[in-house]
Image (tube, grey):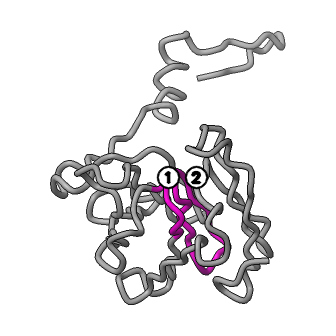
Amino acid sequence: MRSVNPDGSVVCESAAAANAIYQPAMRPWVLDLGSLGANYCCYLRGFTDGTNGYLVPFGLNGVAGNQGRLVRFNMDAFTTAATSSVDVAAVDPNAVGFIGGFTDGRYAWLVPFNGSKAARVDLANFGTGGVRAVDFATIDPALTGFSGGFSNGKYGVMVPSYMRAVSGFYQKAVRIQLQEGAGTQ
């Protein structure tokens, strides 16, 4: 505790006492996804909508493992009881292997890593009924191989990958008009 002496000098707490007061704010909390099952693994990146955190499933197309289970957890509670998930691959088995994601407040968008299928998940209907796969290759076969994404609330952008494609480097970014859903611009 701090105190002020009659002469105006200040007495501060010891370093040990200060650490006891301030250290809990720096104490890490652990969310053990493994306790939810073996399919809760293999995440590379995440994002937040302010209330919830989301873990993006990473995987390579054709490689066994979790490639489509998006996990949502409450940032304040940070417990498995406050955790839910949706398996995007249950809706479209080819919408797997994501590298990043973002939200526009209504939907979560998952960015495809080495494929062309992005996924849009309705945050108010966080289940398979709220999942829609969007295949960018139907617009342009070169729209594949992304390394992340971001949103300003009006548009979402899929960033082309820095990795080399079979026929050259990935060079095409995708912009999605978010208010109208899955349409691209």
Q: Residues within 10 Å of mark 1 (few under 14, many from 20)?
A: many
Work out whether residue 31 or residue 115 is closer to the camera in this orientation and state it. Answer: 115
Please give the name of the residue rendered at 74% of the width and 58% of the height, measured from the top-left corner.
173
Work out whether residue 147 or residue 45 is closer to the camera in this orientation and state it. Answer: 147
Q: How many marks?
A: 2
Q: Is residue 107 magenta?
A: yes
Where residue 147 sits in the image (x, y, percent)? 61, 47
Q: Which residue is mark 1?
A: 114
Please give the name of the residue rendered at 30% of the width and 54% of the height, measured from the top-left corner.
62
Q: Are marks 2 and 1 in contact (CB under 8 Å)?
A: yes
77 versus 25 height, above or below: below
Q: Is residue 101 magenta?
A: yes
The label shown at residue 58 is none
Please tell me whether mark 2 sits on a helix, a strand or a loop.
loop
Q: Residues within 10 Å of mark 2 (few under 14, many from 20)?
A: many
Q: Which residue is mark 2?
A: 145
The majority secondary structure of the magenta stretch comes to: strand
Please give the name of the residue rendered at 26% of the width and 54% of the height, measured from the top-left corner.
40
Q: CA separation, marks 2 and 1?
A: 4 Å
123 versus 72 height, above or below: below
Please give the name of the residue rendered at 59% of the width and 71% of the height, measured from the top-left corner.
137
Magenta stretch: give its range.
98-118
The image quarter containing residue 4 is: top right
Where residue 172 sits in the image (x, y, percent)? 74, 56
Q: Give the amino acid type for the residue marked by disc 2 in the picture.
A: Gly
The quarter of the image holding the N terminus is: top right
* Residue with the most extreme front position: 167
User: As drawn, is 41 to the left or to the right of 37?
Assistant: right
